[in-house]
Image (spheres, rainbow, N blue to C red):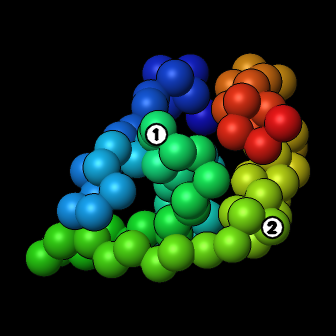
Amino acid sequence: MNSTLVTNERYLNHPTFGMLYRVAPVAEGRDLFATLYAQRIFFVVTLQPRGATFEVVPLMDARHYAEQNLARARRESPEVHAHWRQLFDQTFI
């Protein structure tokens, strides 16, 4: 993976909860986001040509998605893993 992608932060604006930041990729076209200011609300966001869908997920599901991402990143490269580990720690610990 290109190191410029590692530091690529993503933000979305939710119509009710305001600014969200990307915590981890979940699947193709789906990412886990958390509220920026009240970091205990998590969403799986699916980007579509006509907008985005927001699915609220419980904390433990969000943590599970982020742990799966850490396992994938560990196989990819140390720098990718370090980036996602830092974000995981900031979000869940």
Residue 50 seen anywhere in this rendered image of the structure = yes
Count how many numbered circles sit on residues in the image: 2
Q: Position of residue 41 (x, y in %)?
A: 56, 59
Q: CA distance from mark 1 to mark 2?
A: 18 Å
Q: Position of residue 27 (x, y in %)?
A: 57, 69
Is 74 left or right of 19, judged from the image as shown? right
Please name the residue shown 51% across and 69% down the image: 44
Please name the residue shown 78% across and 58% down the image: 63
Please name the residue shown 27% across and 71% down the image: 52
Is 80 left or right of 70, judged from the image as shown? left
Residue 65 seen anywhere in this rendered image of the structure = no
Residue 47 position (above or below residue 24): below
The amino acid type found where label 2 is placed reads: Met
Mark 2 lies on residue: 60
Image quarter in which the C terminus is found: top right
Q: Which mark is residue 36?
A: 1
Is 86 left or right of 26, judged from the image as shown? right
